Amino acid sequence: MSATIDEIAGDIIRRAGDAKRFLIAIAGPPGAGKSTMADNVAHALKSRGETAEVLPMDGFHMDNAILIERGLLARKGIPETFDVRGFLDIIRAVRPADQEVLIPVFDRSRELAIASARVVSPEHRFIIVEGNYLLFSQGKWAELEGIFDYSVMLAPPIEVLEERLWARWRGYQLSEEQASAKVYGNDLPNGRLILENRRRADVTLEIA
């Protein structure tokens, strides 16, 4: 299925009806374009007079010190390298729209999460959650099943992801050897894991 941002925003508003809080999941592998799409959907909703905020899953990366201790630094981004319990707690706190919730945001240039860097207020009707594992069917991530009101899965072909991931890591001034280790040693295998173990989404976009 293919759909434009405006079509998705219209569908979201129709499904939301008069709901005070409506949670949207935008999931997909590394390099699929989740952050860009989340921002675009938020903009489309706001242009229709709605209130929206983006909640990125990446803010729940474990700190590098913990990953080093566990021998997982080179695999940063796999399911085991996130604070899943903390993420679930935040999603459940956001769900009822009855309080202000402070959320962390990941700074990729410094490879660390900044605590309490964004505010989700009760006035934000639409919360757009974006991240790799929102529709992941394994482990503790499976507890997210049923919590989102609307879901989008970005599933570009592997060759498209490969090209985007090379561009990402070169953009951070990594050497060819370092970028190759990131792409083939972590991100692409992780992308395949996500694509092969996903729950059904309301909308699946193969080209994002």
Image (tube, rainbow, N blue to C red):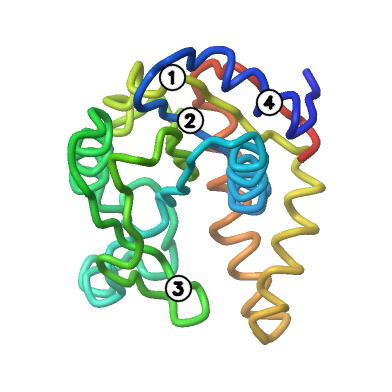
* Residue of label 2: 24
Answer above or below: position of 186 versus 10: below
The Cα atoms of the two marked residues, 1 and 2, are separated by 6 Å
The Cα atoms of the two marked residues, 2 and 4, are separated by 11 Å
Q: Identify the amino acid type marked 4.
A: Ile
* Residue of label 1: 149
* Residue of label 3: 107
Residue 116 occupies quadrant:
bottom left
Local crowd at mark 1 within 10 Å, few (<14), some, or many (≥20)? some
Q: Of label 4 and label 3, which has the lower sequence position?
A: 4
Residue 145 occupies quadrant:
top left
* Residue of label 4: 8
Residue in view at x 51 percent, y 25 percent: 198
Residue in view at x 59 percent, y 42 percent: 46
Answer above or below: position of 163 versus 11: below
Q: Of label 4 and label 1, which has the lower sequence position?
A: 4
